[in-house]
Amino acid sequence: MNARDAILGRIREALRVPAPRSEPAAAPADFTALLPRVGATFAEQVAAFATASRELRTEFHWVEDEVAARAELERLRETAGWRRVAAHRGAQVAPLVEALGLPVLWTDGGYDRRELERCDAGLTQCDALVAQTGSVVVTSASAGGRVLSVLPPHHVVLARREQLVPDLPAAFHLLREKYGANYPSMISFITGPSRTGDIERILVLGAHGPRRLTVLCW
Amino acid sequence: MTTPAEQFKSAARRLTRDLVHRERIQTALGKYEVKRDEMKARFQAWEGARAAAAAIKAGALRHLDRHLEDFVARLEARGTRVHWAGTAEQACQIIVDLCRERGAKTVVKSKAMTAEEIHLNEALAHAGFEVVESDLGEFIVQLRGEPPYHIVFPAMHLTRGEIREVFARKLGDAPSDDPEQLTLVARRVLRRKYLEADVGITGANFAVAETGMISVTENEGNARLTAALPRTMITLVGIEKVVPRLADLALLLPMLATAGAGQLLSGYNTLYGGPRQPGEADGPEEFHVVLLDNHRTTLLADAEQRDALRCIRCGACLNVCPIFRNVGGQAYGTTYPGPIGSVITPHLRGLREWQHLPFASTLCGACTEVCPVQIDLHHHLLQLRRHARAQRPVWWERLAFRVFAAVVNSPRLWRAVLALGRLGQKFHGAVQATRLDPARAWTQSREAPRLAPQSFKQWWRQRA
């Protein structure tokens, strides 16, 4: 008998004896009423994302339109002293990145990872922003692969306002609607810049991933 | 050779008297408690969330065979190779073979308690591979040649000075003992390793049956890199990690973060459903999932204690346990310390050798109260004590309880014993905690409770 059949056999044998004490009742189909409250209006949800971002030390910029987003990016380029950035050819990100006038490493279709390591920032799109937790949802399909959003020291997310969802159940619902049976190989809920508390429980940002996370939304 | 019980007793004796060590744990866990309470309060219904999380995991276990088959079928459909390992040795062998077949030299690992459980690092090192732990806490304890101290906070027992010392000794790079500087040193060292590594190994917090994905929770981004840069990715996952639906994570992820670290959500919660897919920019060419039993089915067969398999390894029960808070994580000598460890270790490694663990509890029930998936921990500890004594009766204990039963069943005897006790108490001070003290086992580290000068009955009679 192979290991698979042996393990499945042991499981079936074990489960023939039902648990003697009362098992918990079935979970509700929707968890919204259990999780932290999020306001029903769009303005409240934006405010919730902004509050969560402040706590997480995500830099969240809510701007009027694409022109304002471009200006904000240029300001970032100057203040952070970017010399070279990495991005992917997403419709929302590519024009803005090209307008920066810096050398760009595009990750689409493969790239040299040592080159990516030398970039000052990684600019990506996302699938959703989650108001409840201040999370950015990215996938290997939407954000230029697995590495772009985590290797450079600064991750900049370019998002549209309609991408804001109220809570985690809504984010999972959106993923299912968007990808159906064809999920990308990686889906990541990014909640704040990379962090560690492993030394005396003192918060340090930029443990392995980006020290800075900027979300630019218009 | 000392037995695990002797080792635990001597470590506990030493550590309970180490006030510096105790102070450190209590400080670290004090900070955690504040954050955890703050996050718990944000839930609209934390108790309801616990019940729902328990129900999800209980439902998953009730049909574990079916969910596992679904999980595997969906993973395989998208190009993942799944391996089944009945024992720790088989799991190590599978992973060593995978590394060997790929001509690997360096293996980078993100934090995985299952890997600690099967002693994977030793097996890989023995086979000649360089294994690098990438989680900062794990990296630090690996440099010190120690097992992790806590399942969530591996290096919580160390001061920055001690960490600086080991960095200076092992890496030759420790500019100061500033946590930020030390983190930067680790980041630099590990970046090089990531770019060199041939194989990346991760654990998994959940395995989603519906979509065939594993879910990895972390804060640093080290697991993200481990699962992205090396050509081969291997994930070791216990069979009990399965959950039925993807949407179940909308509840389980924030509960894990809240109970585990006092965060609403951990920094990175990432799902992996296969190797690099056509059209994707990067990612490993191969993805292997190793499903581990290693006596989990033994625990499943114990219908009474089966709920311990719901555990999501958040460590909340360790953090509130008065025993853990005094002896710390390394005294236990087990992969999983604290209440959950004392419940599952006798199942995973045998009650005969590990029967002392359920006695390392005050049965206060704090563990059961905080468990986000409602495992009846202190009930199981009590039941394991019963099993342990049934397996190996202790004659003097049985005699003592027989005498005790006789005394408390007879009012006369009871009064006589109390009177004797009050008399003896007068002289007790002279011998307290010395070899002549009959209660020495208690009094050498604690104060003996004193009998009241008169009983309630006596007092009531006088009053009338």
Image (spheres, coloured by chain):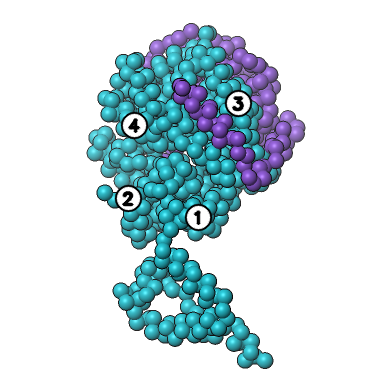
Q: Do labels 2 and 3 share a chain?
A: yes
Give amino acid for label 3: Arg
- Which residue occupies the foreground of this view, A11 or B116? A11
Which residue is labeled 3 in the image? Answer: B66
Q: Which of marks 1 and 3 is in front?
A: 1
Do the numbered discs 4 and 3 sit on residues whose CB atoms are within 8 Å? no
Count all numbered tags in the image, as a single digit.
4
Query: Between disc 1 and disc 3, whose residue precedes?
Result: 3
Q: Mark 3 lies on which chain?
A: B
In the image, taking residue B353 as reference, residue B300 lies left or right, namely: right
* Residue A208 x/y as whole percent: 42, 29
Residue A189 lies, with reference to residue B15, above or below; the image says above
Name the N-terminal-most of marks 1 and 2: 2
Give the left or right position of residue B202, taking residue A136 as reference.
left
Chain seen in purple: A
Q: Name the residue under label 2.
A: B3
In depth, the one of A149 and A97 nearer the eye is: A149
- What is the three-letter code of the residue carrying label 2? Thr
Q: Which residue matches tag 1? A: B386
Residue shown at 41%/66% (left/top)? Answer: B396
Looking at the rendered structure, the kind of residue marked 1 is: Arg
Name which of mark 4 and mark 1 comes first in the sequence. Answer: 4
Identify the mark nearer the N-term, 2 or 3. 2
Residues at marks 1 and 3, common chain?
yes
Numbered disc in front, either 1 or 2: 1
Task: Give the mark, 4 or 3, whose residue is nearer the N terminus.
Answer: 3
Quadrant of res A105:
top left
Foreground mark, 2 or 4, reads 2
Q: Where is residue B74 in the image (x, y as percent from the top left)?
A: 57, 18
* Secondary element at tag 1: helix
The local secondary structure at tag 3 comes to: helix
Q: Earlier in the sequence, mark 2 or mark 4?
A: 2
